Image: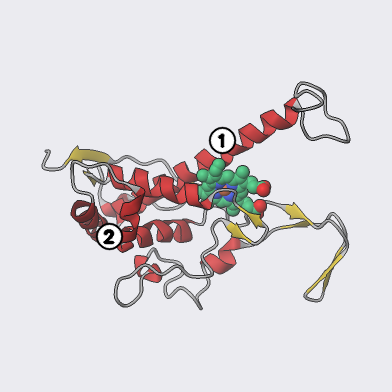
Amino acid sequence: MISPPFSAPPTARSALHQKNLVDTVLSLFFAGTETSGTTLSFGFLLLLKNPDVLEKIQAEVDRVIGEHCLPALEDQAKMPYTNAVIHEVQRFNDIFPFSIPHSVIKDTHFRGYYLPKDTTVYCILSSALKDPHHFEKPDASYPGHLLDAEGNFRKQEVFIPFSMGKCLCLDESLAHAELFLFLTSMLQNSLGPPKALEDIDLTPKTEGLGRVCPPFQVCFLPHGGG
Ligand code: HEM
C-alpha cells in the first residue's frame, strides 16, 4: 500500500509522487534506448568502414547462429570475436566521454585538491577508454584490444563506458544483451556501404554531454541476394 497516493504533490518527506514517477520512467526510456541505439549505429558505421572486421564477425555469426535461427544470449559465449567488436565499438566511440555530472555531498579532500560541498564533478571516462597503457591503438578501432593471443575475449578493467563504482549505469547487462541480439540478427543479412569507403565519415556529432553517430546509409541484403 503506497501512502500518500502517487498523485499527491511532492513533499519534503516522500519521493513517491506523480512527478517523480514520470521523471523516473522518462529517465529509464531515455537512458535505456538512446544509448543502445547510438552504440548500434556507431557499430554499423564502423563495420562499413572496416570490411575485414565485418567479414570476420559475419563468419562467426554464420558459424554459430546460422542463417535461419534467431540469435540467443547463450550464443555469446561461443562468439569471442563478436563480443570483442561490440566492446571495441563502445570503447572507440566513447559515447559519454564525461559520463554525467555529479556533485560532492560534503566538503571533500581528493588527491591534494579541496572540493567544497556541492562542487560539480565529472568522471572522465575517456581517460580510461583511450589509455595508451592499456590499449595498443587507443585512437583506432581495433577488436584485438579485447582479445587474448588465443582469440578469447578478455575484458579489461579500464573498460568503463558504463562508468564505475557507485555511480554506475543501471543496466549494463541489459545493454549488452540488446547490443548482441540486435547486431547479430541484423548481421544475418549481408550489408554494404552505398558509397566508397574513403567517403565514410566516422566523426561523431556532439550533443550535450554525449556523442551521437553521424547520419549514414547502409544496404541490407538477404544472404545470397543481389
Ligand atoms: C550502450 C548502452 C549504455 C551506455 C553506454 C550507458 C552508460 C551510462 C552512463 C555512463 C551512465 C552514468 C553513470 C553515472 O555516472 O552516474 C548511465 C546511467 C544510467 N543508465 Fe545507462 N548506459 C547504457 C544503457 C542503459 C540501459 C539499457 C539502461 C536500462 C534501462 C540504462 C539505464 C541507466 C540509468 C537509469 C542511469 C542513471 C543511473 C543513476 O543515475 O543512478 N542504461 N548509463
Q: Is mark 1 within 8 Å of ligand 1?
A: yes
Identify the residue under disc 1: 29
What amino acid is labelled 2 in the image? Val
Identify the residue under disc 2: 53
Residue 92: name its quadrant. Answer: bottom left
Please state which of residues 116 and 5 is positioned toward the viewer in this rendering: 5
The N terminus lies in quadrant: top right
Q: Residue furthest front?
A: 1
**Residue 138 pos. (x, y %):** 46, 69
Earlier in the chain: of badge 1 and badge 2, it is 1
Q: Residue at x 84, y 54 (%)?
A: 118
Q: Residue at x 81, y 58 (%)?
A: 104
The C terminus lies in quadrant: top left
**Residue 112 pos. (x, y %):** 81, 76
| Vertical order, 47 against 178 (above or below) | below
| Vertical order, 31 against 52 (above or below) | above
| Vertical order, 42 against 144 (above or below) | above
Residue 103: name its quadrant. Answer: bottom right
Check disc 2 and report its element: helix, strand or loop: helix
Q: Residue at x 29, y 58 (%)?
A: 50
What amino acid is labelled 1 in the image? Phe
